[in-house]
Image (spheres, rainbow, N blue to C red):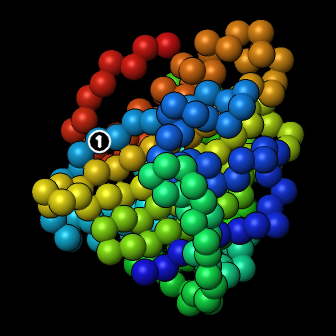
């Protein structure tokens, strides 16, 4: 099992790591809107391993049509970061050091503290943001990471991505987020933020399941 988390991050929100909370959809950080979507992407250990490798090497973002650039790797100091019990109580953490690992194409795996630019189109919307990875998780049946926004963007919040190998041998891709508007446009027209959020999640879900179809409207 490998866990890493990053504490000294210049994110523009306080609830770092809250995408791990079991009750996120019922009790999001104050002022933020939560979102969650998932899709079955197959079954079996091989599918889980392949999807986890895609997850931890930025491939999902690229398959979703986004560009990941100016990657600055974080320290990768792994410790049992901010985790939450089912009742939302934080669980204590320990620490160790993780080794550097690379995907088949040489792309380094995501580590906590990594920063990157993410840009591209989300349906009719353009996006360009600098994000910081706030935690990474690898367990026998679950791989996940989350990044948070850095100040200066039109949206503030955190987004997590997880691959889960469930008890029935099915493999699922889960996207969770909590966001709030910062830019004037989204403050005046908050419904646009939800549209953007749905569009982006649809692109991510399609990245690992090309046959999946959904009528996501503007």
What residue lies at 44% left-to-right and 72% top-to-bottom? 138
Q: Residue furthest top?
A: 188
> What is the x, y in percent for residue 10?
84, 56
Residue 217 appears left or right of 208: right
Residue 183 appears left or right of 46: right
Q: Which image quarter holds the N terminus? A: bottom left
Q: Nearer the viewer, residue 72 or 201?
A: 201
> What is the x, y in percent for residue 158?
64, 45
Quarter occupied by residue 168? bottom left
Residue 46 appears left or right of 208: left
> What is the x, y in percent for residue 113?
71, 68
Count neighbours of disc 1 (C-alpha within 10 A) and say few if under 14, some if 14 to 19, many if 20 or more.
some
Q: On screen, 76 above or below 39?
A: below
What residue lies at 51% left-to-right and 31% top-to-bottom? 26
What residue lies at 71% left-to-right and 47% top-to-bottom? 15
Q: How many marks are shown on the rendered structure? A: 1
Q: Nearer the viewer, residue 199 or 15?
A: 15
Residue 135 visible in the picture: no
Residue 109 visible in the picture: yes
Which residue, given by chain and number where applicable, does mark 1 sit on?
Answer: 39
Q: On screen, 126 above or below 170?
A: above
What residue lies at 83% left-to-right and 17% top-to-bottom? 184
The secondary element bearing badge 1 is classed as: strand
> What is the x, y in percent for residue 114?
69, 67
Q: On screen, 33 above or below 48?
A: above
């Amino acid at each position: 099992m490998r866990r890493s988390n990053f504490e000294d991050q210049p994110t523009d929100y306080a609830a770092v790591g809250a995408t791990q909370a079991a009750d996120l959809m019922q009790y999001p950080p104050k002022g933020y809107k939560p979102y969650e979507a998932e899709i079955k992407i197959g079954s079996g250990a091989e599918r889980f391993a392949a999807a986890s490798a895609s997850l931890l090497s930025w491939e999902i973002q690229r398959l979703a049509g986004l560009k990941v650039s100016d990657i600055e790797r974080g320290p990768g100091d792994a410790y049992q970061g901010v985790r939450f019990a089912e009742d939302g109580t934080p669980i204590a953490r320990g620490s160790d050091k993780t080794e550097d690992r690379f995907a088949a194409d040489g792309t380094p795996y995501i580590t906590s503290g990594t920063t990157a630019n993410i840009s591209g189109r989300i349906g009719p919307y353009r996006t360009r943001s600098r994000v910081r990875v706030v935690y990474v998780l690898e367990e026998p049946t679950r791989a996940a990471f989350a990044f948070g926004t850095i100040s200066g963007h039109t949206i503030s919040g955190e987004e997590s991505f997880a691959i889960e190998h469930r008890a029935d041998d099915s493999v699922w891709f889960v996207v969770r987020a909590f966001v709030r508007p910062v830019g004037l446009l989204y403050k005046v027209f908050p419904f646009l933020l939800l549209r953007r959020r749905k569009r982006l999640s649809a692109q991510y879900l399609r990245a690992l399941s090309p046959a999946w179809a959904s009528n996501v409207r503007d």
